[in-house]
Image (tube, grey):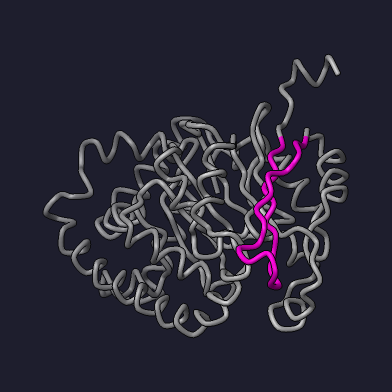
Amino acid sequence: MDVYMLGMSPVEDLLEKLKAAGEPTRLRLLALLRDHDLSVGELVQVLGQSQPRLSHHLKNLSEAGLAERLPEGAFVFYRAARSGAGLAFLDPLFQQVSPDAPEFQEDRDKLRDVMLARAASAETYFSSIAENWDSLRALHFPNEAIEDTLLELAGSGPHRRVVDFGTGTGRMLLLFSGLAVEAEGIDFSHRMLTMARANLERAGVSNSRVRFGDVSAAPFENASADLVIVHQVLHYLDAPGDAIAEAARILMPGGKLLVIDFAPHDLEFLRAEHGHRRLGVRHDALSEWAYAAGLKLEAPRSFDPPAPDAPGLTVNIWRAIKPSIAKARAA
């Protein structure tokens, strides 16, 4: 919680932040959380202190607006403040004391071991679902061509902030990390978030994060992203229009929404065996959701199944634009 919400003056706010950061363990925590989203359990492994003690320190940092608390099912992850007064305090602080300083190096070495354990856990889970994953991939057009089209429709950037709804393994974050100042993905599955974190860590991506979140109630401020991606998500949802409305809410004027999903099909086994709520997404349905959300939807780019005579899935990519304020008024 930012202390401004408690009615503190700027001087009181500064003193509160200095007090929170001016303790050895809390400074070590901030150095770690600047680059990684970490659970209390992972921080226990790195710092070798008890969970209650570290939870107390993290509570102090959160109350001072220097750390963010990210609940994720039975887990809670923490990250250093990435916006507002907290970030404005931390940036000059770590210009004076680098996270790579020798005092922090032992923590970074231990964190590396924790990250390897996280990657191993993700690999074990992915191996358990790989057969089903590969069978689905074989039903539609090669991902490389689809991803090339996504990059084309998004534009060369740089994008100020990319948000990925239903991030899964984090593939969209990896694809767009080089074109974004910052990017963040949300997902409702802790296992998928574990995989995404491991994939981002393995690829050395430092400008992208993931967190637990519901695409129908996204944990982001209004007009906070210039590109939102909804990749193979809508067919899992009972109310896909809610996700489109949330994407429109967080888009800046002039921002772009990219939706990737299957065209209507009759592969009923996907509903029974893979949890698909809808057998594809109709263009007219998406048009209605986009119109209701105030977005201008373009005709989709379509990719037919790789084998025309065999059962398969057509993949559609839609782009929608949130009109600028001036254009919206003119309309």
Q: Residue drawn 81% across and 71% down?
A: 266
Residue 263 at x, y percent in the picture: 76, 58
Residue at the farthest front position:
309
Residue 53 position (above or below residue 141): below
195 to the left or right of 226: left
| Image quadrant in which the C terminus is located | top right
Pinpoint residue 63: horizontal percent, then vertical percent. Answer: 50, 52
Task: Report the side of 317 relative to 106 (left or right).
Answer: right
Residue at the extreme left? 102
Horizontally, residue 195 falls left or right of residue 316, namely left
Q: Is residue 272 left or right of residue 24?
A: right
For residue 315: magenta? yes
Instruction: Give how far across and how far down residue 196 sits, in percent.
Output: 46, 64
Depicted 305 relative to depicted 163: above or below: below
Q: Does residue 301 show up magenta in the picture?
A: yes
Q: How many marks?
A: 0
Q: Quadrant of residue 127?
A: bottom left
Residue 283, compared with residue 138, is above or below; it is above
What is the x, y in percent for residue 70? Answer: 53, 60
Q: Residue at x 55, y 49 (%)?
A: 1
Residue at x-position 56% and y-position 44%: 150
Choose between 3 and 308: the one closer to the eye.
Answer: 308
The magenta span reads 297-320
Looking at the picture, tell me which residue is in the foreground, 100 or 189.
189
Nearer-the-camera pick, 62 or 168: 168
Q: Could you tell me which residue is drawn at 46 percent across and 60 percent down?
A: 59
